[in-house]
Amino acid sequence: MSMTKEMALKHLKDPAVFCCRRQKGLKISEADLEDPDIFDDMIDSGLLTLSDDGLTVEEVLGSTLTTDVEALTPITKDVLDKVNEVSAPEPETPAPEAPAAPAPAPAAPAPVPFSSFSGKDNVMHIHIGSADHIEDLSFEIPIGPGMPPAPGMPIPTAPGETFVPAPGAPKKAEKKVIRTLIKKHIKITDAEIGTETTIKDGKITIDEGIIEKALKADPLCKSLKLDVIHPNERHIYTDTIMDICPIATKVEGVLGEGVTKVADGVVFMLTGVDEDGVQVHEFGSSEGFLDEKMYFGHPGCADENDIIIRCHAVIASKSGMTRPGPFAAHKCEDVIIQAVRDQLKTYEGEVVREEKCEDLRREGNPRVVLVKEIMGQGAMHDNVICPTEPCGVFGGQKNVDCGNVPIMLTPNQVRDGSIHALTCIGPATKEMTRHYIREPLVEGLAEDEELDLIGVIFVGSPQVNDEKMWVSERLGSLLESLDIDGCIITTEGFGNNHIDFIQHIGQAGKRGIPVVGVSFCAYQGQLVVGNKYATAMVEENMDAGGFENNIAGCSCVTKEVAARAIQMLKNKMSGVEVKPAEKKWNNDIINANNKLLGLKETVLVESGTLH
């Protein structure tokens, strides 16, 4: 890939290599030279061998070729009419040596933050550090009446210090509440399959006879079976895990406001095969022992002590890789869940936790949005948006049928179960229905007092490239019209949808919007495309080998991933340098960043097993 003028200025001191075959008489420009950012990959693959006699970019620009030269050939002086003279940097004058002082007692190294700020005597002291301490920088900038802090960019303080705002500096943004959602978590202690559907004394009972009614919801679903799996019974075989769905219901208002009850301590798990015994899955399948095939405690999964009500569906032969087949299983399961929702509406059980969620504005703070790319490629890639009940199916619209165009939801609507997930991508990277009702990025951005979360945009990933570009352009126009200061873009899965993912990042970047990307890449999901705006990327992988490991919900957005992404967005918007990642995935970098933010380490699991 040839360079632009902007790229050439960045790489003046790097080796000069022709990107394509060039003929005698050519006057060399940046467009004739290969991008040094991809040299490491080319060297690893054997496509490029650098020369000790090779010249740098600044030494060859404007020179004329005296012979024909093949592609990916380092440029040496014997093929040029001249070599540009490059002045050597002046040596630094050493400072006078100070008298020797007694060596201080060694101290334990303290973790270096991404950036630390303090304000004393109307001077802003800024320290920008790196995990390896090699390129630490410190600045002192006056912030008196003539230089107030940038509007909307609050300055956090270093530990133990208090920032005194300069005269005329903007006040801390005050929040303006638009609407409020209360989520009441009702304690559930047991569940069983019986002869009536009730909730009594913390126990859910489901009438087994409801299966006959549920099957009428869609003829492609041929049979259903219900059973209950308690936490101590998880070493049990399961077919592929299609979804984890919470039991939640509206008791006041509509999605995003009012009051919602959520059954605490229990979830539904949908599994499925077709009539031929073929697992209903796409890239990878999570059938096996349940305790080895789900990452318990991750946002989309059952928690460690949850009771699991398993709904096993058998759908029509050869319908697993179509849109209607898997959707039939979800529809029929939703009939059963709705019967439990109806009981939950009137059940006055113990409230173990009450969440107060607010849609609000923090005027004066940086305006940001979260963009979540969801699957929309057909062949089982449906998601239901804004159903009637939280996490439900009925009453909603499928993103594929909506043309995969960007759809804006409020943070409260997302936290109230406005997404029901059908995406049957690889198990580890699949964001199941439960993930969205407690999405760590939505929760983190909404609660961050330094940011103004405008909303959450859901955009589908079509199958055809022309449609991908069209949808991405619509997203770009939407981002521009919102007049935002930054955005985070996520995608589940990898491969085909990475084409859209990078295009979305480009749509934000070319409009001057600071953007952070979040995805599973690691080893197996390495990006196949890129652009110059994809400079701030956050990795989701939790597999030791960097693969899709078929453990449901393993490599998705977690609290730690969200915290790194939010901090990186703040750094981008503040102009703090985000250093380029290593050429290959390295979990040590992730844990170094986790340490800087005071987060727990990302502990990887061995491929195919869960410890």
Image (cartoon, rainbow, N blue to C red):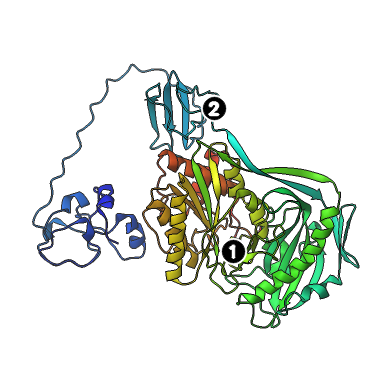
Q: Quadrant of the N terminus?
A: bottom left
Residue type at mark 2?
Answer: Pro
Q: Which numbered circle lies on residue 159? A: 2
Q: Is residue 439 left or right of residue 307?
A: left
Q: Looking at the image, is mark 2 or mark 1 earlier in the sequence? A: 2
* Residue 64 at x, y percent in the picture: 11, 58
Q: Secondary structure at mark 2?
A: loop
Residue at image point 43% right, 36% down: 129
Judging depth in this view, the residue of 438 and 552 nearest the camera is: 438
Residue at image point 87% right, 63% down: 197
Q: Which numbered circle lies on residue 243? A: none
* Residue 524 at x, y percent in the picture: 50, 64
Q: Residues within 10 Å of mark 2 (few under 14, many from 20)?
A: few
Q: Which numbered circle lies on residue 549? A: 1
Q: Is residue 562 left or right of residue 123?
A: right
In the image, residue 130 sits, relative to residue 480, either above or below, namely above
Judging depth in this view, the residue of 282 and 250 nearest the camera is: 250
Q: Is residue 391 left or right of residue 78?
A: right
Query: In the rendered image, is residue 450 in sight?
Result: yes
Q: Quadrant of residue 312?
A: bottom right
Judging depth in this view, the residue of 8 and 219 nearest the camera is: 219
Query: In the rendered image, is residue 611 in sight?
Result: no
Q: Quadrant of residue 135?
A: top left
Residue type at mark 1?
Answer: Asn
Q: Residues within 10 Å of mark 1 (few under 14, many from 20)?
A: many
* Residue 104 at x, y percent in the picture: 46, 21
